[in-house]
Image (cartoon, rainbow, N blue to C red):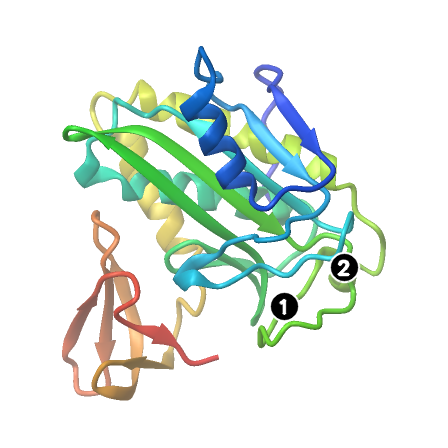
Amino acid sequence: MTNCPEPAMSFPIIGLEETDSTNRYLADLCDTAPTPPPEYTTVTTRFQTDGRGQRGNSWESERGRNLLFSTVLYPRFVEARRQFVLSQIVSLAVKEELDTCVEGISIKWPNDIYLHEKKICGMLIENVLEGSRIGRCILGIGINVNQTVFRSPAPNPVSLKQATGRDCDARAVLEGFLRRLHASYEALRRDTDGRLAADAACRYADALFRREGLHPYEDADGRFSARLAGVEPDGRLLLQDETGRLRRYLFKEVRYIL
């Protein structure tokens, strides 16, 4: 398990009882406030009425039982063509914080977090470009913490409480994540020679779900078996199928068969 970095700063946190979407609330705040909220401003809520996930999915969460939040960054030092590095450091910050709670955490490309074969965290990263750079990045994250009954048709949810048998402190998980994000993001800001980005890419690759062996996937041509061959800097997934053919996929072009 990974040790948590020492606190680097305090973070502005806005706590809501209920909202439609923390990403939408934070984006509206950024767009309408006389002064944009500072980096790391985080909106949390006990309940979302319209939580959004990848592929247009909704995110199920029982009121007050899980961790639902969004955080804003202004990574103008990141070129749009390199934006996947943000997904990598955010995914790693979540994964490494959950590593302190339970074993068996991995990152399912591009940025779902899994506990063994079950999904414990989903995220939606929304970037706003300013020319060739990223002007704003809002990270929307939902972590299953203390929910034990899931009623949605999602096939494989799991929570920290189900894994550990005890209630977990959602606020402590949030604060640990923010400390890890801050450490990695500020290092990325200073990363003039690309070493941090390269290290993040290696750690991300090592943390990937189903990193070893053949596993089933499906693309527009149907199902096939392949082994994970890597992830390119732009986020493209590389799979090598049973015939030895190397297949490259952007997000939504391929899916895991779970």
Give the labeled residue for mark 1: 157
Residue 211 visible somewhere in the drawing: yes
Going by the image, does 133 lie left or right of 151? Answer: left
Q: Residue at x 63, y 44 (%)?
A: 68
Residues at badges 2 and 1 in contact (C-beta under 8 Å)?
yes
Locate residue 206: give its quadrant: bottom left
The correct choice, above or below, for 76 with respect to 218 in the image is above
Q: Position of residue 87 (x, y in %)?
A: 37, 44
Q: Residue at x 64, y 72 (%)?
A: 152
Q: Amino acid at mark 2?
A: Gln
Secondary structure state at the residue bearing disc 2 = loop
Q: Residue at x 28, y 87 (%)?
A: 224
Q: Position of residue 170 (x, y in %)?
A: 73, 41
Give the labeled residue for mark 2: 147
Q: Amino acid at mark 1?
A: Pro
Locate residue 46: give its quadrant: top right
The correct choice, above or below, for 42 with respect to 153 in the image is above
Query: 69 or 82, which lies in front?
Result: 69
Q: Residue extending furthest right?
A: 166
Q: Position of residue 185 (x, y in %)?
A: 41, 27
Q: Residue extending furthest top?
A: 35
Q: Residue at x 15, y 28 (%)?
A: 131
Badge 1 density bin: few <14, some 14–19, many ≥20, Cα 10 Å: many
Badge 2 density bin: few <14, some 14–19, many ≥20, Cα 10 Å: many
Locate residue 184: give its quadrant: top left
Mark closest to the chain's N terminus, 2 or 1: 2
Residue 208 visible somewhere in the drawing: no
Going by the image, does 109 lie left or right of 79? Answer: right
Q: Residue extending furthest front?
A: 32
Query: 38 or 224, which lies in front?
Result: 38
Q: Whole-Å distance between the Cαs marked 2 and 1?
A: 10 Å
Q: Position of residue 136 (x, y in %)?
A: 34, 29
